[in-house]
Image: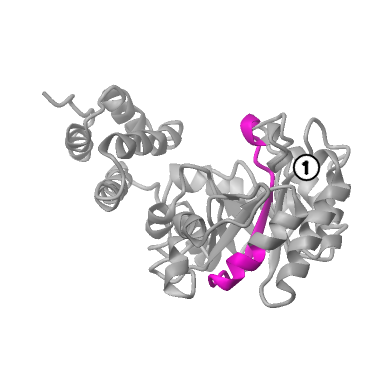
Amino acid sequence: MVEVDVVNLLHDGRIGLAPMEGVIDAATRDLLTRTAGIDWTVTEFVRVVDARLPPRVFLRHCPELAGGDPRTPSGAPVHLQLLGSDPVALAANARQALALGATSLDLNFGCPAKLVNRHDGGASMLRTPWRLRTAVSAVHDAVGDVIPVTAKIRLGFADRRLALDCARATEDGGASQLVVHARTRNEGYRPPAHWEWIGRIRRRLSIPVIANGDIWTLEDYWKARTLSGCRDVMLGRGALADSGLAPRIRHWQGTGEHLPPTPWADKASLLLDYAAMQRSILSSKTVVARLKQWMNHMRGRDPEAARCFQALRRITELDDFLAGLRASMTSEAPALPA
């Protein structure tokens, strides 16, 4: 029988914005935190191998560091994430990040990417819990109590047998909170998410545990919190698919009311804003590729997004793509630009 902790779901639980490599960059963090809902964000990972990285690498991943207090323009804190396995190199880069103004460091032990795992990073560490403890301890010792050190894991690499050991290892190493993605590395992003397993972990740790994985809707949020017993959650793909999800959850927490679905015109407008922010920084083809990547997350749960994606998916020129996107905001099916 599944063990369930029922929580007061109208209590003000926090919502974090998950890091997604190559997807959630500084511009995306800015856009998704403009409307109240997201309480904190985490950067794409800074890959640590065997040396201290120069400041420009940290600033590329976290340009918000340049302001001295890393936050999005709307004020949401930005936590810097490191990914690596060498405790000495992690410690050196933790000290570098602290010197640059980082206010929190998150350690990535959950990335399922094959390339990252082949090079002893991300979820590959979940096969040897003692190494998680060593890595977290090295970073914690490097920054002392000046800034918090947090961690993110999955439920295991190939299976869940070491899930509790991995979670305890992060706490024993000095992590002040733990995000748990409710699947193993081998399960990737295939449903279902095992939120009840996060509850097993939460009951055995004294630090806050945050539920992550497959929270696409308000109903998913309710289930994730109920099955995990966690007060806080972290959104990733769900926030990309629906920029109104976090504000919808926040409104429901405070009022008990269900807001209507986010209109496609609002989502398309967000994509246009993203393109306007990025076209002077990235190449046109890169901007188009990122817009398609973002729309790919939207289309699975929004028929209008799916129609627009189908109409525009072969377009590579940015201006043509944006013209089609604008047309989709006022018509049921966007026409292909001439």
Q: Amino acid at mark 1?
A: Met
Q: Residue visible at 28% across and 40% down?
A: 283
Horizontal side, residue 32 vs residue 186: left or right: left
Image position, residue 119 (x, y; %): 69, 35
Question: Residue 16 magenta-drawn?
Answer: no
Rendered position, 121 above or below 258: above
Q: Looking at this view, is 278 or 32 the one in front? A: 278
Horizontal side, residue 188 vs residue 239: left or right: right
- The residue pinned by badge 1 equals 125
* Quadrant assignment, res 321: top left
Q: Looking at this view, is 101 or 278 the one in front? A: 101
Q: Residue visible at 27% across and 46% down?
A: 275
Q: Residue visible at 63% across and 51% down?
A: 222
Image position, residue 49 (x, y; %): 66, 47
Q: Which residues are magenta?
A: 94-116
Label 1 environment density (alpha carbons within 10 Å; few <14, some 14–19, many ≥20): many
Which residue ends up furthest to the bottom in the rendered image?
146
Q: Looking at this view, is 209 or 172 the one in front? A: 172
Image position, residue 244 (x, y; %): 42, 52
* Quadrant assignment, res 176: bottom right
Question: Residue 110 magenta-drawn?
Answer: yes
